[in-house]
Image (spheres, rainbow, N blue to C red):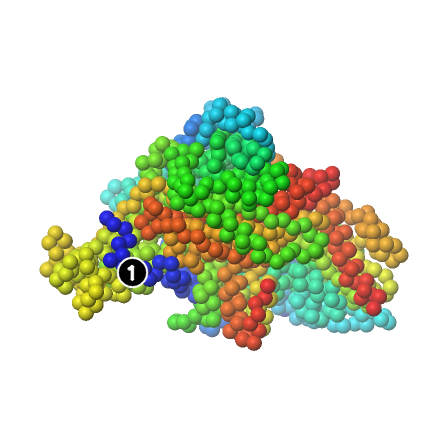
Amino acid sequence: MTLLDPTHSVTRHVGARHERLEDRPFLVGDSRYSDDIELPGLLHAAIIRSPSPHGIVRSVDTSELTVPVDLVLGPDEIAATSNPCPIHWILPEQWQTERPLYDGRVRFVGDPIGVVVAADRYLAEDALDEIFVDIEELPPVVGIDAALADMTLLYPDRGTNVMAQWMAGDDAVHTDAVFTAAESSLSIPLRIGRVAGVPMEIRAIVVDPGRPGRDGRPEKLTIWTSTQAPHAVRDAVAEVCRIPQHRIRVIGPDVGGGFGVKDHAYEDELMVVLAALKLGRPVKWIEDRWESLTTTTQARDEQYTIDIAYDRDGTLRGIRLDAVRDAGAYFSIFGAGPLFAMTGTLGGPYRWDAVSSHARAVASTTCPNHSYRGFGQTQATFVRELAVDAVAAELGMDPIELRLKNCITPDEQPYQLRTGPMKYDDGDYPTSLRMARAMADAWPPVPDDGRRWGTATSIYVQQAGVGPSQGNPHVGLQIGSWESTTLRMERDGTVRAYVGVSSHGQGHATTFAQLIADRLGCEPEQVEVIHSDTDVTPYSAYGTAASRSIAVGGGSAVLAAEQLAARLCAIAAEILEASPDDIVLDSGTASVVGTPARSLDLAEVANRAWQGWALPAGYDAGLVEHAVYEPPEFTWSYATHSCRVAVDPETGLVEIDRYAVVMDCGTVVNPTIVEGQIHGGVAQGLGPALCEEVVVDETGQPRTTTLLDYLVPTSSLMPNIEIAFQVTPSPHTPGGMKGMGEGGTNGGFSCVVNAVRAALPEAAHRLTQTPFTPARVWSALHPDQETP
Amino acid sequence: MKPPPFAYCDPETVADVCDLLTEWVDDAALLAGGQSLIPLLNLRLARPGLVIDLGRVAGLDTIEHLATAPNHAVVRCGAGVGVTALATAHPGAGVAEAIHWIGHPQIRARTTVGGTIAHADSAAELPAVLMALDGSVTLRSATSERTVMAQDWFDGPFSTTREPEEFIVSVDVPVPDGPSWWGEVARRRGDFALVGMFVARDRDTWRVALSGVGPTPVRASGCEGALAGGTLDEACAALDLDLDPPDDLHAGSNHRRSIARQLLRRAMSELTPAVAA
Amino acid sequence: MTAITPATDTRDTTFVLNGTETTLRVRPRTLLSDALRHDARVHGTHVGCEQGACGACTVIVDDVARRSCLTLTPQVHGRIVETIESVAGTVGLDPIQQAIHDAHGLQCGFCTPGIVMSLVAARRAGADRTIAVDEVLDGHLCRCTGYINLRAAIELAWNELEPNSLEPSS
């Protein structure tokens, strides 16, 4: 069908700064997060965890227990009553393709091995104090070097701690030839620190087993949980806890942030489900912040060598990456996926003769590393843009001129990537760079205040809008990338939109309503967006992740709305005795084009559809449309970030003085919401650039277990951000959206890192490990004094 | 993260607190503002048998201005006085500034003078102020009352010379007769200091103490001496010798020394003109 | 002699909660955040860290904003406690809430009630916009907004409070 047929719709809401429709409950305390769910007879769980980073479990001793508890579910019973957790992404040389809830060993401090259930959380924690976990200690494996040494193995029967490895992009022979032919090259070692996602609402699950069915299993198991992906949780519960999928209902009520760490069901949650099943009573488990900073999956923690080959005139020739990711104790649902995304997007917006990566993921006795906003593309931007700046410094070239010289131009689009069967779309990267330069050029001069000032510019092209599904098996991904929307227009013309993607801050209730309202000629307030209830909403394997909601989910909403619009036009045409092609839907009416007097309220049209009589030939009664959108390609949003920092050489403190972003995410459905995503994304970029770091000591004990040790940005660390938009609508997505939720993080991390290095050129070669804490910055400036 | 079980009481008189401490001794924890104790309870790092809530004890919330000698005054705070009230009552600009650096407003509003002095976090602000000014702590038990000078009060990380049956009834914060200054470098505003520094001019001498640079707040005596007669560079060199800062997650030892030197230069650039004037 | 409530016993704490005298019978170790949420069943106060660091649980006690996770329930006996539920009417919003809405100062919304309570207390205490932006907001963690629109919201709200000082703080 023809998209965006101008005779059928008038764009009033897409592109407008529509106020958020979902705000009021959050503002007045009337929201409903998982911990707000209260049920009769509700019991409370606490997780029995390993105090040791590595060992063989001898026993879980409950003989000292004096606290009244309803259940202690130990590891042996858990193992006996569950199937392994599935892993959705199987990469080359990856042997861990599923993961039992318990296999007799513990592999990080906090590794869950059981559940205790009591009348309240206080008592459950009291019980934890009286449960003794006897562990035969094994040596910890902390750090990439220790993991690669293979002296101690996490999985002894595998003979190595390497969990997956692959080559991506050009082969070694070609890449070596490009590097040999190039006039110069640089090789830079880098280390990116481990981060925690830190959603403000920590993980939570409430399990109501309901009444038993004829087979003794729950007739309908209802789960409320803080998740980005309710269907992924349902699938995991069904598989692991051995319950048919149709007897599980997973609801994501209000969800207080995800950022990647809530994209799957954890062992902890699955054990709580097992406990509720055993008890036949509802059980609630609310993670605490210690657990969140210790056992909720973390991210990054990678070591790189980035090589870049170039000619003396500034022509970039080749980029070659060797990357090792500390995967932690085991693979979570997407395995080493972030590192795979990094190797696939390494080249960015530049022309190269060779792009090549060798990637390995290794096991260590630390919390599993997994998804986090950016999903590897933050890392790709980091190493590439840092290397490009290093070339500019080496050549004495302006870093933006160097970028412009090598940037793919619009007339080269769609540009074939060297790292896979993917093509960029219609982006205009040089204009992005020039716009950002103009914004930075307008900044006032820096004061002479004894601090060292640096400016940097980073550009990325982000693979968003994951797809198409049929490409996934070629990269080992076991799930589909499509999304769907079901629309139902009620008799009065109001609309319900059932969407597969979930919303936990992204504003879908507003943006999806804007997309739909424009196609139906109604107001966004007349569209209710319903999400995150597996009994009601369409299947979505991912939920909301990977910057894909508005591009893929939104694409399906546009398709469904256009189908519904076509149906409304046909019915209106029948009533108005006109051609459906001449009907315009606008301002709550269906009217004949050029003849406004021949007009019906949408409610009249809708009512006719539900009455079921006098419909056009071939039309059934009712007003329900379902549309599946299978993205034919990835979408490629991109942005340039520029920032200026001031470094105090005596304290090592970094202040971000100015910040500008030029964003192209295709059609901007709601600029206010997109700007909000940029703000939050940049905050999550500069945090790990400057202050956020998970620290595990050499004994395997986590050291950053409170929010006074794991430092996330506060307001005073966050600069204001100037934002400008380019709009090149996606040629693929219905509606033209490209997706951008992770972009701020991708650009922000790299931009801040490079600005600090630019401020301290004499110490840049020592600033190779993030975050650039005051300690690391100071030590880089005073290399003879101490190492951090 | 829920507190472990403990018994609770909220006595109304100092005498009742003394009696409770006589009975429970070191199995009791004293709850003032709670901004240090309750996090420790929540993490189950503190497991007292009894929590004695001092919030209703009469007579701990007074502030007195005492003249102890010619040109020398002291602000005597009841242990339950909020630090923000001390900031208002104390004439020293540096004292108010130090208090302004305590946590965030939502924390500071609950922080008490007695609580922060008793908690004795060496990275906290008020302990360093007390050290610099030769302040003192007055303790009461069922059988005695005694006053301890700041230098004898702090004896290790989160540790003081308080006996288990004693509790703080008041804290004397002297008033320097010259200008005073607080400066601090923290990773984020409201975090505990990497280094904090209090400097005061008092009866023709300098008083300097630091937080975040040792197991206790540290009085920089060598630096004080160097400031009396030497150059600023000599004072910085003396300060280096006064300090043996720890290496930890947030900063190394020499890094902390560097910050301390910067703070001293900032302090003197602001205080010297004021003293001269 | 002072009465001691044993650890396993409950104790009555009577206070004014959002204008209504309320008695909660809880064990003395019960954090005010938990008592409000699970005993008084006002769920708008959120628990984010129980370490005093994030500010999501901030409520107003006797006109002062404080962390309910760093407050034992018996400590509020005889006091006046206000939570987010008391701020708006059944329709309409308080100007601070309205400003946060207008400036898109919330995304997931989890931290929002605590921030509103801190700002309501700051307004009541006569804090100027600089204090509200630089100090009060810094006592809260928000992971979604990057704070920029929260700062804009404070400017909006304080423009209404201080119509004669419209210049924004830096």
Q: Residue at coordinates 49% horizontally, 58% vertically from top-left?
A: C111
> As rendered, which of A641 and A178 lies closer to the eye?
A178
User: In the visual, does B195 lie left or right of A641?
Assistant: right
Q: Residue at coordinates 44% horizontally, 65% vertically from top-left?
A: C101
Residue ranking furthest to the right:
B229
Residue A723 appears in the figure = yes
Q: Which percent across, then down, holds residue A757?
A: 62, 44
Check the image and report above or below for B215 versus A607. above
Q: Residue at coordinates 40% horizontally, 41% vertically from top-left?
A: A413
Reading the image, the residue beneath label 1 is A10
Q: Which percent across, then down, holds residue B159?
A: 71, 52
Q: Regarding mark 1 in the picture, which secondary structure is present there? A: loop
Q: Which percent across, then down, holds residue A32?
A: 39, 58
State which quadrant residue A189 falls in.
Answer: top right
Residue ranking furthest to the bottom:
C164
Number of disc labels: 1
> As rendered, which of C79 and B227 lies closer to the eye?
B227
Residue A118 appears in the figure = no
Disc 1 residue type (three-letter): Val
Subunit under mark 1: A
Q: Quadrant of the C terminus of chain A?
A: top right
User: In the visual, does B125 lie left or right of A696?
Assistant: right
Q: Residue at coordinates 56% horizontally, 39% vertically from top-left?
A: A388
